[in-house]
Structures are given as C-alpha cells and as structure tokens.
Image: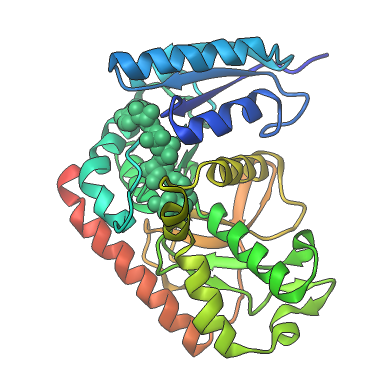
Amino acid sequence: MSKKPVRVAVTGAAGQIGYALLFRIASGEMLGKDQPVILQLLEIPDEKAQNALKGVIMELEDCAFPLLAGVEAHSDPMSAFKDTDYALLVGSRPRGPGMERAELLAVNGAIFTTQGKALNAVASRNVKVLVVGNPANTNAYIAMKSAPDLPRKNFTAMLRLDHNRAASQLAAKTGKPVASIEKLAVWGNHSPTMYADYRNATIDGQSVKALINDEQWNRETFLPTVGKRGAAIIAARGLSSAASAANAAIDHMRDWALGTNGKWVTMGIPSNGEYGIPKDVMFGYPVTCEGGEYKIVEGITIDEFSQECINKTLKELTDEQDGVKHLL
Ligand code: NAD
Ligand code: LMR
C-alpha cells in the first residue's frame, strides 16, 4: 500500500535555491522514492514574486512527478505552514559581494519571528524545521524562540553545506573518494568562524589527520578555504551558492528523516549544554540520526586549538543572539 503524503513547506520558493530544490523534493530525493509529498510554497505577496511562483508550479506540474500529490502557492505563512510536517525556511535576502552573513540579520531577522510564530500556531507538532536563510544559525534561533509551543529540538540550521565543502576539500587533498570520509565535524556558526574539524575523521579506517600530516595546511589553507567558500562563490558567480545549497538542504532533511546509519553529519541544533555550549545556542555539532531523531556525537576530545576555534565561533553566535533580543 502506498504511503500517505506528507506536507513540505518551502519558503522563498521562487528564488534561486527554491528552483534547485523543489524538483528534487518532488522527485523523492529528500524523503524517499516511496514517499508522496504535498508542496506548500510560500513567496512574498509582491506580484512579480507570485507570478514567478506560478511559473515554477507550472514546471513542477509539467514534470508529472509520480510522488507529487499536490502543490499549493501561498503568500501568508499562516496558510503555507498549515499542518506541515517539514518546513524549509529559505526565503530571505542573500548577501552580495563584500558583505558578511551577519549583516543580513537586520533585514532578515524579522522574517523568522513571523514565521516562527506561524509554525507555532499551525504546523504539525512534529514539524522538522530547517533554516537555510542567512544568517542561518541565528535565524533558526529566532524561529525557535518565537515558537514556544513546539519542541526546541524541531528547529535546526543548515551547516551541511560547510560539511560537504570540507569533505570535498579533504577528498581532493588525500586523493580519496569523497564518500569514503567518515567522522568529520563542523562546529559552530555558518560563517567564516566555523570550525571544520577533521582530527577524528577517517578514510577506510585510516586517520585523515595522519594521512595529511600537515597542520600548516589545516590552519592556513583548509580552514580559510571552507570558511570563506560562500564568499568565493559570490565573487565568481555574482550570486550566492544555490545548487550546492539546495543539495545540502536535501542531505540535511533526508538524513534527519531517514537516518545516517551511524555516519556523522553536521547539523546546526539548539544546544543542551553539550561541549560547554550554553543552552539554546544554535550550534553546528556532529550528529548521527536514527528514527527521525538526531543525536550529538559525544565524547570527542577537544584539544587546545579546537577549543580556541569553538570559543571564537561561539562568541560570534552569542553576539548575534544579543543583537536580536528586540525581535524576541
Ligand atoms: P533569492 O533572492 O534568489 O531568493 C530568495 C527568495 O525568497 C525570493 O524569491 C524572495 O522573494 C523570497 N522571500 C523573501 N522574503 C520572504 C519571506 N518573508 N517569505 C517568503 N519568501 C521570501 O535568494 P537565494 O539565493 O535563494 O538564497 C536564499 C537565502 O539562503 C539567502 O539568505 C542566502 O544567503 C541563504 N543561503 C544559505 C546557505 C546556507 O548554507 N545556510 C547557503 C546558500 C544560501
Ligand atoms: C554560502 O555559504 O554559500 C551561503 O551562506 C551564501 C553566502 O552568503 O555565503
């Protein structure tokens, strides 16, 4: 017997990431090839955005996806999030050349108060929320704080793009297949302060750190390359990453919903004090997922350099939190 459709809300559905995301969700790449979906798409009420959304919906229809059980266009989060099981909060302004993501808080922060409240009011009580819109960690924090009737653990921020970028750099450095890299972690904020950590990573059981054996490369090449990859893409493309961001959103939600088989992935999640991070800070942690729940990988040794990196990214996140108090 076929499964009952689940409801997937996507905001910013007519934007660049939306265009790279929706067709893959509708084809079953996110929730499985046996899981029908109803897409609940949100765009701003502006006529141009709503028209663009209509065009995207026409294209979705023209794909005749067997798993697409319905598509809805919305301009109000209260209807877009009704009974939704999954919410991908993409809609918000991207940065341009020379900007830092934190500078977007002033323009984007308020979106997540409104949307957090709407999720609180109308979404499924088990909704899984992924915030992609930047600055993703603090926007996810705002949404979580604006939804006091939903479990805190339902709110997450996207660090999977950073995780995937780090894995790809390590594959290139070692000459090994990217899929063979295990136990990689990206701690903290989706910003240049993130700490991409391969100290525990392995390839076919061998230590990646030992294989590379070059701490200078770690500190002077790897960390800045991963940390500033978003800016490098904006400089090259004139637009922020879209296909790779959509791909990371699919990876994040698929792994959360369907499990990681013990493999470590990185998710931005609200801390419960793990690794000394204060409660509620939306922090990138290594996790494994099973049965629709994520679990932080515990017992990782944090050396002095790693602790310094973690402290730096934490300080940035607590400063961002202080800066949005007026929205909560
Ligand atoms: P885009 O400008 O192409 O599209 C954004 C869309 O969101 C637009 O269509 C806009 O009309 C819509 N929108 C704006 N406010 C909205 C609201 N309140 N409700 C619903 N829709 C709204 O931008 P994009 O390239 O798709 O990027 C979207 C966001 O994702 C940006 O903030 C970008 O910085 C961020 N991003 C995050 C990551 C990450 O790793 N976390 C990666 C890439 C991009
Ligand atoms: C990215 O990392 O590519 C995105 O967050 C977009 C950006 O502004 O860097």
Quadrant hosting residue 177: bottom right
Quadrant hosting residue 117: top left
Q: Residue lying furthest left in this view?
A: 326
Q: Which quadrant of the rendered structure holds the C terminus?
A: top left
Q: Nearer the viewer, residue 43 or 237?
A: 237
Q: Residue 185 appears at what percent x and percent y?
A: 59, 67
Q: Nearer the viewer, residue 86 or 71?
A: 71
Instruction: Tally the marks.
Output: 0
Residue 196 lies left or right of residue 175; in this view the side is: left
Q: Which quadrant of the rendered structure holds the N terminus?
A: top right
Residue 191 lies left or right of residue 324; in this view the side is: right
Residue 98 lies left or right of residue 129; in this view the side is: left
As displayed, is residue 102 above or below residue 170?
above
Ligand number 1: quarter of image: top left
Residue 59 visible in the picture: yes
Q: Residue 299 appears at what percent x and percent y?
A: 61, 75
Residue 328 visible in the picture: no
